[in-house]
């Protein structure tokens, strides 16, 4: 119960004189942290003790002419937050209670009336939009329950009032935000809404009304339940496009960009809606993309629209490949955008490879979009276009065009790999000619292309052209006038060697290792870092062939590890750890043993040193320890007490997540690039990716230790299992889930071996049973919720291994749960296959799309193979007692077998006699 003092304060704030409440609103925006905190505390007390008077005072403030505009806007924001509070990212925190259920019926009616009156009072636009936010939040709560009867008639009337454009715009904005909640209820009024939107899209004087109508149309099309319903809105598309072109023709590019963002959303969600008029729509977008007089942001959004259509494979497979003339125009636009790079001395004198001096806004967009376009459209469509344009660029006098051509080759390699392999000689020749260009940025781009193609076209590139590529990279490492070229050549050695056999690499090792040792002594840190990374990769690829160079290389590596102690050298030191551990793994324990002890002493000393959160040494050290463990095997056990505490700490990191409403003006801000923002439904989520990457690395390392040390890992199982098992459902980061999945059988194996060998600290088989009872049900539950097909295969594989290790420790209820989940997996797989068959019936389905579907079906076959492995294990383990379960499953299995049912069934029943 509120104290008398609190009651008096509430009475003063919520009484007849609004001045005290306005002062509270003003203080809530204060720059003084102390004042703002006091005001927030007072506001929260009011919310707890007087929710209804507080809500009504906020609502009455919205249309109070005497209240300053900024306070009215603040009142609207607070009211929206009270009506639909954003959940905390802290899962342990209690969910905030919405205000609405706390109000009396009279209070609820008054609040609804205040909100609609506030819109009718023609407030300034910033306030009107915030009032729309509040109405939308409340309507989303009430409309599904049919408890705001006045709202839809009000919106229909307001949206049909062109003489009051501000009110019309507000009504349309609310329609747009509520489409998801009211689409079903609007089906009976679809033609009325169609006509209303057609009229608003053609508003004579207000671009804001036209954009609001476009927003409503886009959202409604996405929310209508059937294609037939969407077809009724089809003839709005020309008017929707005119809303965009009218903005451009009247030089209102900010409004045009809003329109483009909406149309991009439509292209991603309902590409088939655009299909009948795709030539006109795509042509208009390409005209915008080609218009160099427009702002970069406008052109980028037009490009994004066409790329989004190309990527809409599941909803409109092959549609853009039917328009090769448009793909060609887009490709040309993107190559021209790559020319947005200028000579800049800062590029040449840069201290890091990340320096992008001279690159304009268009350059980075073009790079990303070429990559996405090639992956979406495929090599059969892209390579012929590239084959026409690239020679033109490579024969031009401007260095920028040579640079653009080489960057293009690198960007399209992943999506066009199969087709480029057929023309590999021509491709390699183009790139190697770039190594001879007088401009260092062109040489850098040629090296970059070789590095990318080494990944995307390997190992064919390595097998067929090592005798040309490796000498060219070695020569580039001699370019002491251009350290960036040297550093990039070293990085390309890494890419090339990763897909290289020791037999190919060995003849070149003398020259490569010699040059890399020279670069290690270079004054430029980025050159040293590149050399370290290349040495690590060369050692890893050449394995025991690297023994010959060990004595020459290791002293340099240890010197860097021990002496690169300044903050500016953190990455250099981190990469020396990586290189030392990979060299140690390559040459083996006997050769590395003495140096390993010195290295581990340095790492132990570092381990006890406080580090900043962004220090790369943390992640590199976690990985270096794990490689040292792989190299030393059981000899590594004495170091586990040093390694494990910080490793567990990293694996237990909580995701740094910020959640706001997708419709709110509250932006998720970051002073760095480590926060990724995604929108899920009506929530905007910001995730700090650096935390997730450290967590993923740590989880992978835990799996590595369990795998390598076997029973020696037993003392850590009680800490590691509760850390990793919950991460089977860690949906923020796939690599974390993958590591947790892979670790499950390793933990069980470690426990089982320790018990069998008498190294389990007095524990017996009951401990293995206890661990199995913890792991297997968690795996089954995670499998049930797993959204990714490939991960389902991994989970089934892990489950199968766990079942083999547990054997008859599994009880009947667990076998029943596993059998039920296998049934669910089969049903889900069959559904996905049927969906793919439906996609083959699309108007634009073609051979390229067929190839992509074939790859997806191969993933599906892997799932089914793993199901077979699990069933085989269950039958081998439980023999005839599993037959009742198998008989239940056979109804689901048989349709999946195709023609060759006999072989599969014979295999499974054969397990009974094994």
Image (cartoon, rainbow, N blue to C red):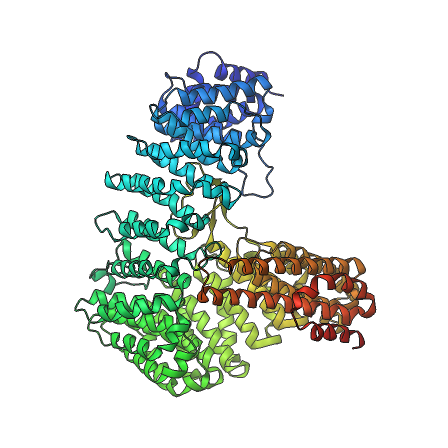
Q: Residue furthest top?
A: 16
Q: Is residue 174 above or below residue 429?
A: above
Q: x, y (%) of residue 72?
A: 40, 23
Q: x, y (%) of residue 641?
A: 60, 65
Q: Is residue 790 left or right of residue 821?
A: left
Where is residue 808, by image quadrant? bottom right
In which quadrant will I find the N terminus?
top right
In which quadrant will I find the C terminus?
bottom right
Q: Give me the residue at 42% from left, 76% from top.
A: 458
Q: Give me the residue at 51% from left, 83% from top.
A: 591
Q: Residue furthest right?
A: 881
Nearest to the observer: residue 94 or residue 609: 94
Q: How many marks?
A: 0
Q: Give me the residue at 46% from left, 79% from top.
A: 541
Q: x, y (%) of residue 343?
A: 20, 62
Q: Is residue 368 left or right of residue 57?
A: left
Q: x, y (%) of residue 415?
A: 40, 66
Q: Residue furthest left?
A: 397
Where is residue 203, by image quadrant? top left
Q: Is residue 240 visible?
A: yes
Nearest to the observer: residue 593 or residue 362: 362
Q: Is residue 164 left or right of residue 38?
A: left
Q: Is residue 30 visible?
A: no
């Amino acid at each position: 119960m509120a104290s008398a003092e609190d009651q008096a304060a509430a009475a003063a704030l919520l009484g007849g004189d609004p001045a005290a409440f306005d002062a509270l609103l003003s203080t809530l925006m204060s720059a003084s942290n102390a004042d703002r905190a006091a005001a927030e505390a007072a506001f929260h007390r009011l919310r707890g003790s007087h929710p209804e008077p507080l809500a009504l005072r906020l609502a009455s403030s919205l249309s109070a002419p005497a209240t300053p505009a900024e306070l009215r806007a603040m009142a609207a924001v607070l009211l929206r937050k009270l009506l639909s509070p954003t959940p905390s990212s802290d899962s342990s925190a209690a969910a905030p209670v919405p205000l609405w259920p706390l109000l009396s019926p009279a209070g609820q009616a008054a609040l609804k009336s205040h909100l609609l009156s506030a819109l009718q009072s023609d407030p300034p636009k910033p306030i009107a939009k915030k009032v729309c936010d509040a109405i939308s939040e409340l309507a989303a709560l009430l409309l599904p329950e049919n408890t705001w009867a006045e709202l839809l008639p009000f919106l229909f009337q307001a949206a049909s009032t062109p003489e009051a454009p501000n009110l019309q715009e507000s009504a349309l904005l609310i329609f747009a935000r509520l489409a998801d909640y009211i689409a079903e209820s609007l089906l009976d009024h679809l033609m009325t809404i169609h006509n209303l939107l057609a009229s608003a899209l053609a508003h004579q004087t207000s671009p804001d009304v036209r954009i609001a109508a476009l927003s409503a149309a886009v959202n409604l099309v996405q929310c209508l339940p059937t294609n037939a319903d969407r077809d009724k809105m089809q003839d709005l598309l020309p008017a929707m496009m005119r809303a965009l072109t009218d903005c451009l023709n009247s030089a209102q590019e900010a409004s045009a960009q809003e329109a483009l963002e909406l149309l991009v959303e439509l292209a991603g969600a309902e590409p088939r809606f655009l299909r009948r008029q795709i030539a006109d729509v795509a042509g208009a977008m390409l005209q915008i993309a080609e218009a160099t007089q427009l702002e970069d942001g406008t052109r980028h959004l037009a490009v994004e629209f066409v790329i989004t259509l190309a990527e809409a494979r599941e909803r409109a497979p092959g549609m853009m490949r039917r328009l090769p003339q448009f793909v060609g125009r887009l490709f040309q636009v993107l190559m021209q955008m790559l020319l947005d790079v200028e000579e800049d001395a800062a590029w040449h004198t840069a201290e890091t490879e990340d320096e992008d001096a001279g690159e304009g806004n268009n350059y980075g967009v073009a790079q990303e979009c070429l990559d996405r376009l090639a992956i979406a459209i495929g090599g059969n469509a892209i390579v012929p276009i590239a084959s026409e344009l690239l020679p033109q660029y490579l024969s031009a006098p401007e260095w920028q065009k040579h640079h653009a051509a080489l960057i293009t080759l690198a960007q399209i390699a992943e999506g066009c790999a199969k087709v480029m392999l057929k023309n590999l000689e021509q491709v390699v020749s183009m790139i190697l000619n770039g190594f001879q260009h007088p401009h260092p940025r062109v040489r850098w781009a040629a090296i970059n292309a070789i590095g990318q193609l080494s990944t995307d076209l390997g190992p064919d590139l390595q097998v067929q052209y090592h005798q040309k590529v490796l000498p060219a990279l070695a020569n580039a490492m001699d370019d002491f006038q251009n350290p960036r070229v040297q550093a990039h050549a070293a990085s390309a050695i890494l890419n090339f060697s990763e897909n290289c056999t020791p037999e190919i690499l060995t003849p070149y090792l003398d020259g490569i290792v010699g040059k890399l040792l020279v670069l290690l002594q270079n004054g430029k840190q980025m050159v040293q870092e590149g050399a370290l990374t290349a040495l690590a990769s060369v050692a890893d690829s050449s394995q025991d062939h690297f023994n010959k160079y060990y004595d020459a290389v290791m002293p340099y590596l240890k010197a860097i590890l021990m002496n690169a102690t300044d903050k500016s050298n953190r990455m250099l030191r981190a990469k020396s750890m990586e290189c030392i551990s990979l060299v140690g793994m390559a040459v083996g324990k006997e050769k590395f043993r003495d140096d390993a002890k010195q290295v581990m002493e340095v790492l132990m000393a570092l381990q006890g040193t406080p580090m900043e959160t962004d220090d790369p040494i943390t992640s590199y050290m976690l990985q270096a320890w794990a490689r040292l463990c792989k190299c030393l095997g059981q000899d590594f056990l004495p170091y586990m007490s040093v390694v494990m505490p910080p490793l567990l700490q990293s694996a237990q990191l909580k995701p740094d997540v910020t959640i706001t409403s997708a419709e709110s003006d509250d932006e998720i801000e970051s002073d760095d690039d480590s926060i990724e923002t995604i929108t899920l439904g009506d929530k905007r989520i910001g995730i700090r990716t650096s935390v997730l990457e450290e967590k993923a690395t740590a989880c992978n390392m835990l799996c590595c230790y369990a795998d390598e040390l076997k029973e020696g890992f037993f003392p850590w199982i009680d800490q590691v299992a509760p850390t990793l098992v919950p991460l089977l459902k860690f949906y923020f980061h796939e690599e974390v889930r993958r590591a947790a999945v892979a670790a499950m059988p390793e933990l069980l194996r470690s426990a089982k071996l320790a018990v069998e060998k008498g190294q389990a600290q007095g524990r017996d088989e009951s401990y293995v049973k206890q661990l199995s009872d913890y792991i297997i049900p968690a795996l089954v539950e995670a499998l049930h919720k797993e959204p990714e097909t490939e991960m389902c295969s991994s989970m089934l594989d892990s489950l199968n291994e766990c079942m083999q290790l547990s054997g008859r420790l599994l009880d009947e209820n667990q076998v029943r749960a596993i059998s039920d989940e296998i049934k669910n997996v089969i049903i889900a797989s069959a559904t996905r296959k049927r969906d793919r068959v439906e996609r083959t019936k699309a108007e634009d389905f073609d051979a390229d799309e067929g190839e992509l579907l074939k790859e997806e079906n191969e993933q599906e076959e892997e799932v089914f193979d793993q199901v077979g492995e699990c069933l085989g294990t269950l039958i081998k383990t439980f023999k005839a007692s599993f037959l009742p379960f198998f008989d239940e499953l056979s109804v689901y299995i048989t349709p999946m077998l195709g023609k060759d049912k006999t072989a599969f069934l014979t295999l499974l029943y054969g397990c009974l006699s094994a």
